[in-house]
Image (tube, grey):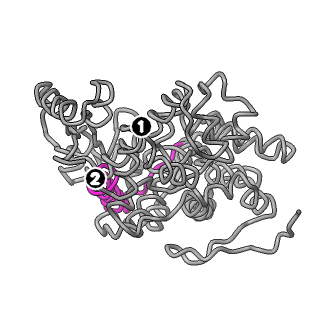
Amino acid sequence: MKSSNKLKIFNDPIYGFITIPNSLIFDLIQHKYFQRLRRISQMGLSYLVYPGAHHTRFHHALGSMHLMQKAINVLRFKEVSISEEEENGLLIAILLHDIGHGPFSHAMEHSIVNDVSHEEISLRFMEELNKEFNGSLTLAISIFKGEYPRRFMCQLISSQLDMDRADYLKRDSFYTGVAEGNINSERLITMLNVVDDQLVVEEKGIYSVEKFLVARRFMYWQVYLHKTGIVAEQLLTRILKRAKELVQQGIKLNCSEPLFYFLSSKVNTESFESGTLTIFAKLDDYDVVAAMKQWQYHEDFVLSNLCEMIINRDLLKIKMKNKPIKTSELIAHANTLMDDYSVSKAEADYFVFHGEITNVAYQNKKQHINVLLKSGRIKDIVKASDQLNLKALSKPFTKYYMCYPKKKM
């Protein structure tokens, strides 16, 4: 049933009213592929740490589009030429940049599909929509892939200071209540300019960029890499891996048809074709939550215990260290579990494991945030800033973790 283009604004808790600029973007927002993002959590299982973090990829996509509108207006005011077609391409590319995320955002990429990133799936969604909308997304796809010749446009979609980051830091800070992550995204955008087809920040915006990078570091340690959040995401990844393992052994698991398809099939980049995409479009957080609620009563020791841990928020214990975890510690915890519950080493590995996390707020070896000085020279933010700590923010810092069961499961 076709709906008319009546809705022209959204009321966003961060920016106020967000305007939908034209009927094409309205129709893309109305499309079932995009509406699915209402059922994909922006921050995975972070609500187990921060109870307010229940916002979705739908919120984030609209917010990113709103900031892109602001950026286009600012650059045009500074006499940067952006045609109406290019404006549409930028808005569509940022609107759809996360459309390929699976349930709980990242867990699926590491469990029931093999090395298929959400960026690849986003591109496939955009290509399908391009067929449906008679080639209207061709320019947006070129910008999204980083192939469009006007480099600064690609940087607005994906760079160290893109509209994606400008929204998610502010939005995630708001919904988690972590004030240290709050950035002045509108001030940052007002300071943008273009020189030699590269995105730059005017010198008077240096302090806003510094705040942005410091906020990013805080958000990673306090939110995205929070130890409880790490445990929860690892458990979810292991639940899906275990479920796939059992289904492929012929063991019956109750779950939705889309989820069963991915559990019973070997899906990789080559096999992820149009039919797979159609099934993927029916998969969201609700499928996984409903499955976990049933699987917590399954006879399989591993699956039932893992599900119960997330459903009841009774997670594994986690230890964080600045040095790699000793193998002897892992073996000791695994042996205890094997003795207490008569499980195999392979089963114990689902509950006793280790890993590492790295935080680098500014990846200056890959990309630069360039500052346009009043003299007309362009410098990297680290060299242009008088803040010594920015140099430290460009160095990766690694922590190591170990997860294992509490005394009684």
- Residue 88 occupies which quadrant of the picture? bottom right
How far apart in space, not on screen, are marks 2 and 1 (Cα)? Answer: 25 Å
Q: Which disc number belongs to residue 228?
A: 2
**Image x and y of residue 338, in percent:** 22, 30
Which mark is drawn over residue 193? none
User: Residue at 84% across / 45% down in the picture?
Assistant: 132
Mark earlier in primary sequence (2, 1): 2
For image coordinates 50% across by 51% down, the residue present is 294
Name the element at disc 1.
loop
Q: From the image, tell me which residue sits under label 1.
A: 300
Q: Amino acid at mark 2?
A: Thr
Classify mark 2: residues with Cα within 10 Å, few (<14), some (14-19) or many (20+): many
As helix, strand or loop, the secondary structure at mark 2 comes to helix
> Where residue 21 sits in the image (x, y, percent)?
73, 66
Q: What amino acid does circle 1 point to?
A: Asp
Magenta residue span: 198-225
User: Quick one: 408 or 19, which is closer to the camera?
Assistant: 408
Q: Residues within 10 Å of mark 1 (few under 14, many from 20)?
A: some
Q: Residue 6 at x, y = what percent?
A: 81, 74
**Tag nearer the camera, 2 or 1:** 1
